[in-house]
């Protein structure tokens, strides 16, 4: 659980969440390289995510689809683009993932995770560009994500954040009761969620 000092200053480290993942997944999300396994046993493609990431994400999307890659590889590629501020390319990767046969045949929680990630990307785009359309798209993706997996911690968090950042909420100066209830519900189910804890301070 984060310390009181961390919560009061907002100085939260990704290490807190990374430690909940298995070692292989931790390495995949923190590595500067993207490693994509190929169908040929033992073969893989390694890409320097900082220096060699293609400007156009479509080539990597084709590779991921042709190799029937699981969600984690789509997410890692999307994350690499997002880390470089290329939110549109990151969103393109997730949209391509959602139309990939291996993802269409996957469980609802997998599809929910991708829709939820896309919602966060649209929300990030809005924060950078003040684009109201991005908020609408984020709301649509959030609703889809929640319908597929209503118990997801990430989905509950994006629900709360979007309630605070929607155009209607932006125009309000007070009365955050609905949004507070969402955060309260999130904390009841996930008592150590850092962002929900910060909202309550």
Image: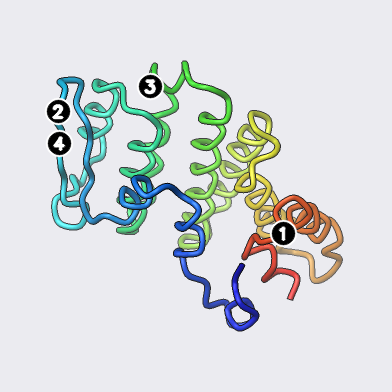
Q: Nearer the viewer, residue 20 or 101?
A: 20
The answer to the question of whether label 3 and label 1 lie on touching residues, with beta carbons closer than 8 A, is no
Residue mark closest to the camera, 1 vs 4: 1
Which label was assigned to residue 191?
A: 1
Question: Mark 2 packing: few (<14 Cα in 10 Å), some, or many (20+)?
Answer: few
Instruction: State how far apart marks 3 and 1 are (Cα).
Output: 35 Å
**Mark 1 or mark 2, which has the lower sequence index?**
2
Residue mark closest to the camera, 3 vs 4: 4
Quickly name the residue at label 3.
100
**Mark 3 or mark 4, which has the lower sequence index?**
4
In the image, what residue occupies the spot 58% across and 52% down?
Answer: 132
Where's the C terminus, which quadrant?
bottom right
Residue mark closest to the camera, 2 vs 3: 2
Residue 36: x percent and y percent?
Answer: 23, 35
Quickly name the residue at label 2.
42
Q: Nearer the viewer, residue 23 or 49?
A: 23
Instruction: State how far apart marks 1 and 4 are (Cα).
Output: 40 Å
Q: Is residue 51 left or right of residue 16?
A: left
Where's the N terminus, which quadrant?
bottom right
In the image, what residue occupies the spot 20% across and 47% down?
Answer: 55
**Mark 2 or mark 3, which has the lower sequence index?**
2
Quickly name the residue at label 4.
45
Q: Secondary structure at mark 3?
A: loop
């Amino acid at each position: 659980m984060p310390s009181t000092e961390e919560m009061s200053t907002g100085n939260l480290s990704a290490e807190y969440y990374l430690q909940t993942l298995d070692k292989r997944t931790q390495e995949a999300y923190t590595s500067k390289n993207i490693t994509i396994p190929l169908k040929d046993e033992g073969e893989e493609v390694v890409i320097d995510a900082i220096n060699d990431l293609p400007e156009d994400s479509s080539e990597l999307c084709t590779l991921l689809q042709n190799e029937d890659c699981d969600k984690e590889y789509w997410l890692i590629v999307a994350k690499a683009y997002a880390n470089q501020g290329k939110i549109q390319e990151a969103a393109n990767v997730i949209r391509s993932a959602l139309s990939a046969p291996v993802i269409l045949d996957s469980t609802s929680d997998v599809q929910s995770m991708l829709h939820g990630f896309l919602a966060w990307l649209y929300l990030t785009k809005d924060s950078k560009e003040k684009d109201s359309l991005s908020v609408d798209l984020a709301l649509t993706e959030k609703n889809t994500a929640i319908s597929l997996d209503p118990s997801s911690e990430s989905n509950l968090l994006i629900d709360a954040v979007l309630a605070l950042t929607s155009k209607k909420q932006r125009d309000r100066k007070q009365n955050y009761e609905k949004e507070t209830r969402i955060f309260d519900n999130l904390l009841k189910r996930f008592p150590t969620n850092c962002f929900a804890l910060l909202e309550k301070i």
